[in-house]
Image: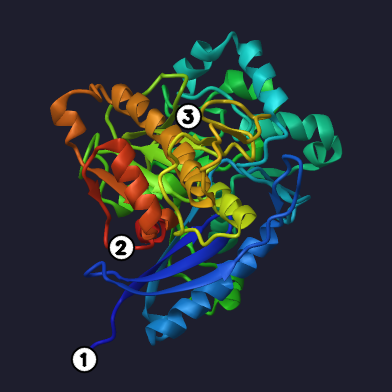
Amino acid sequence: MPSRTVVIGVDSSTQSTKAAVIDAVTGEQLAVGRTPHTVTGESGARESDPEVWWRALGDAVAAGLKESGLPARSVTGIAVAGQQHGLVVLDRSGRPLRPALLWNDTRSAPQAAALTAELGGPAAWTGRTGSVPVASITASKWRWLREHDPEAAKGAAGVRLPHDFLTERLAGVAATDPGDASGTGWYATATGAYDPGLLDLLGLDPALLPEVAPTGATRVGSLTDPAAEALGLPAGIAVAAGTGDNMSAAVGLGLGGAGLLDHPVLSLGTSGVVFAASRTRSTDPALSGFAAADGTFLPLACTLNCTLAVDKVAALLGLHREDTAPGGEAVLLPYLDGERTPDLPTASGLLTGLRHDTTPQQLLGAAYEGAAVTVLRALDTLLRACGLDPDAPEVAARPLRLIGGGAQGRAWVETVRRLSGRPLVLPAGGELVALGAA
């Protein structure tokens, strides 16, 4: 029997790297290698050393291949999907000058507000980029870096997103895609290119940025000899542009111009995310009006506090995450890291409605409910941005696809089902971001 031909899809997320070995003919997931990351910081700071991502990629690829039982020569291509928005600054040798500022680093909230005002308000931003600057957007982080670490900003020979950094390590080419680029705050979804006026506003030299490939699936180069040696893969195999994690999950779910349009997805992970692939370019300030990886658009809302916040409440109460009951009169807003949707970067958690008969299980249930309501409220805004009425019976009956780590938990699924009133679809594939990359 001839050997299988496989490709590797990489999901480089906030907490870990997953490398999925996918049959290039059937699309079957054969194996997944996993390696954790290290995130540091407190009081709003969230940083990681990009070199950790690179080492984790190598370890995850090796683990995936070992689990698959296939030889490295079976691999014909690789692509990376990465956590969005993170700011990586490189020196002339392509090495990081400092730890990367991650998407959930909220220190740049004042810079986001200043940028919004300097351009003339939210509508001015959404008209060009589709999104209003918040602390997570890369443009806000670049402004923060210029103000708080000017030596790193002045010394930067390259400015990258996390997935760009890894793609460049693989292929030796500075490349990105429209999907991940649309989360920077300096890429205009209205024109499909970097916005010269915004780059001037940010004091960012366009020569520091990667080229934007037409799609995330575009081949941007081949695996270099040094990268092949580091990963134990054949040199010269195809390297695609890759994309952001949310755009890649949409591909893995079959959403986009060649698949399902305007079908909502709820991702329960470190963040709570709702998105849909659409031909409509969103200009709603409450959403991130991203581009998708394939030429369509990906209106999206992201909440900072999801599974980690609920797990923190469970730990404080000494409960297992599944040992929960509906909250009753108790209401808990689990804004433990500030919040992005709504834009409340300095918010903290709030608990109200306690009674003598309130149980620990109800308090944990209230944490689930608070996180779920926040993201489900954003879902209605998302549907309107797609040109749909969320209250219309045919729209309310449209299934909600539930993905992410939380979708594996009974309590999360039942809370979303109860509060949304929608039919839920739980896709069988567990590593949709890595599958989309493949």
Q: Which mark's residue is nearer the viewer, 3 or 2?
A: 2
Give the labeled residue for mark 3.
193
Q: 153 above or below 234?
A: above
Image marks 3 and 1: residues in contact by CB distance under 8 Å: no
Q: Residues within 10 Å of mark 1 (few under 14, many from 20)?
A: few
Estimate the spatial distance between the alpha carbons at disc 3 and disc 2, rounded to whole Å.
33 Å
- Label located before the other in sequence (3 or 2): 3
User: Which picture quadrant has residue 117?
Assistant: top right
Q: 111 above or below 358?
A: above
- Label located before the other in sequence (3 or 1): 1
Disc 1 on helix, strand or loop?
loop
Query: Residue 103 shows which numbered tag?
Result: none
Instruction: Looking at this view, name the residue that lies furthest to the bottom.
Output: 1
Q: Which mark's residue is nearer the viewer, 1 or 2?
A: 2
Q: Residue at x 52, y 79 (%)?
A: 62
Q: Position of residue 46 (x, y in %)?
A: 70, 46
Give the labeled residue for mark 2.
429
